[in-house]
Image (cartoon, grey):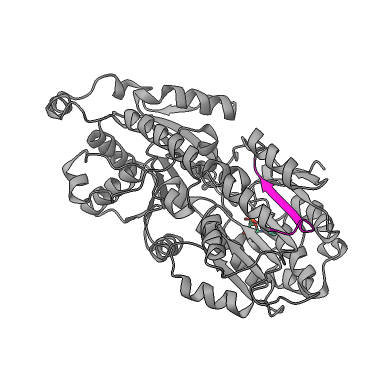
Amino acid sequence: MSFDTLGLSPKVLAAVETAGFETPTPIQEQSIPIVLAGRDLLGLAQTGTGKTASFTLPILTRLEKGRARARMPRILILEPTRELAVQVHESFEAFGSEHRLTIALLIGGVSFGDQDRKLDKGADVLIATPGRLLDHFGRGKLMMNGVEVFVVDEADRMLDMGFIPDIERICKLLPPTRQTLFFSATMPPEIQRITSTFLKNPERVEVSARSSVVSTITQKWVSVPKVAKDKRAALRNLIETENIKNAIVFCNRKRDVATLETSFERRKLSGRALHGDMDQHARLETLRMFKAGEITYLIASDVAARGLDIPDVSHVLNYDIPDSPEDYVHRIGRTGRAGKEGTALGLVTKEDSKRVAAIEKLIGEKLEWLGNEQTATEEEPKDNKRGRSRRAPRRASSDDNAANDNATATRSRSRKPAEPEALETSEAPEASETSEAKAKPAPKQKAAPKREKSAEPAQPATEGKGSWKDSPVPAFLQRSVRP
Ligand code: AMP
């Protein structure tokens, strides 16, 4: 199968060739003809499958007919995070370089000025996070009744982030004649409800299982103490003993991302934090530095790392075991890519036994322990116990804190859907664990849903070159498509 047979315009085919794509991925092969035929599409696929081009290429072909009118875009694409929106924007710019389109990227964390100017000029394509799009709409800056194609990407993450009410609101502002393309990695009942309300007789395309783990990843558990200071020491010990070229260190909470960054700085380890409280420019700069090898460690929360294209990561270190086993699969999918060997180490405390069991159930494999299973967690060093007893009794443990965050999440979700920006400041502040944390306290944050769903396994930008089959995309993502 080649791209020529899918019905794409000559201009788009030329751009595909320039990008070095030779063979369509399964999702592209299935979806492109459906999108070109004007049908609604329900795509069950995750990042890394070539999903972006599966809608970008046919949409560009469609856009060759007709023109935009001021403030009336023809294409609307919703993404759950700013980083994903930026990636889709890059894809449109790359494949649409000959199309003379105006593409507006409407994301939070940056000023309205440039976005307003683009909208005033008449944008053909809007790529937006839901909160910022509704802000623009509320300010009378755009009309959505000219939208011909509406794309909802990563719908299950939108659900996790509390955006479904926003999506429903946006759907109602669009003309009923529009075409809707809906992508989600999973189909929880709420997403099913939305699709049956807003999609018209959709074609369904499905690629890959979400629980798959690439076979090039060596995974192990490492037993660590629960006390934060000792857990950090265990992490540093791992860093010294493992042969790490570069690593993403995942934390469940932004507070811990900040603490670890300070700890790394003190030990002269080359690491930088990436989390949702950072402004967009700082996030992109940190990512650039990591990709360029200017820093060795990226200390990240799930939301900031979601869906990112980070090439060639030798290790994923799960400083915290994620609450959701799917998040574990996505986190470790950042290493062992492109046929390279990768290592994923999970730091396990006594409190993590249920999480570990859930992960092993999902991946269908019992993982080995590096060193002894759980022994380090059996007893905490006396010093730490003393230290803990001195602390104020009301200080919550991290698990208590998680429970509080969850309660906050439920309350906040039931009141009002959160904006992406608000969500990315989701973790509640807590008393500093150590002097390190005091030296660099986590910023004040708004209360909002606690859980940050993880990013999908990302593909390096360079992976775009060459044939899909030869491309270093993990085998599990290349499985054939079930229509
Ligand atoms: P996506 O799932 O859209 O994030 O794409 C994942 C990666 O695969 C990106 O780096 C794309 O550039 C690359 N890619 C997408 N389609 C193809 C293709 N047909 N051939 C080679 N690489 C591709």
The answer to whether one can see residue 310 in this image is: no
Q: Residue at x 36, y 59 (%)?
A: 295
Question: Looking at the rendering, which quadrant does residue 481 occupy?
Answer: top right
Q: Residue at x 70, y 60 (%)?
A: 53
Q: Residue 334 at x, y = what percent? A: 52, 48
* For residue 70, side relative to residue 332 (left or right): right
Locate the N terminus by quadrant.
Answer: bottom right
The answer to whether one can see residue 431 in this image is: yes
Q: Residue at x 54, y 38 (%)?
A: 329
Locate the C terminus by quadrant.
Answer: top right
Q: Residue 205 at x, y = what percent? A: 77, 45
Report the front residue among 240 and 305. Answer: 305
Q: Quadrant of ligand 1?
A: bottom right
Is 158 inside the magenta-drawn segment?
no
| Magenta stretch in the rendered image | 174-185
Q: How many labels were placed on the picture? A: 0
Q: Residue at x 45, y 44 (%)?
A: 316
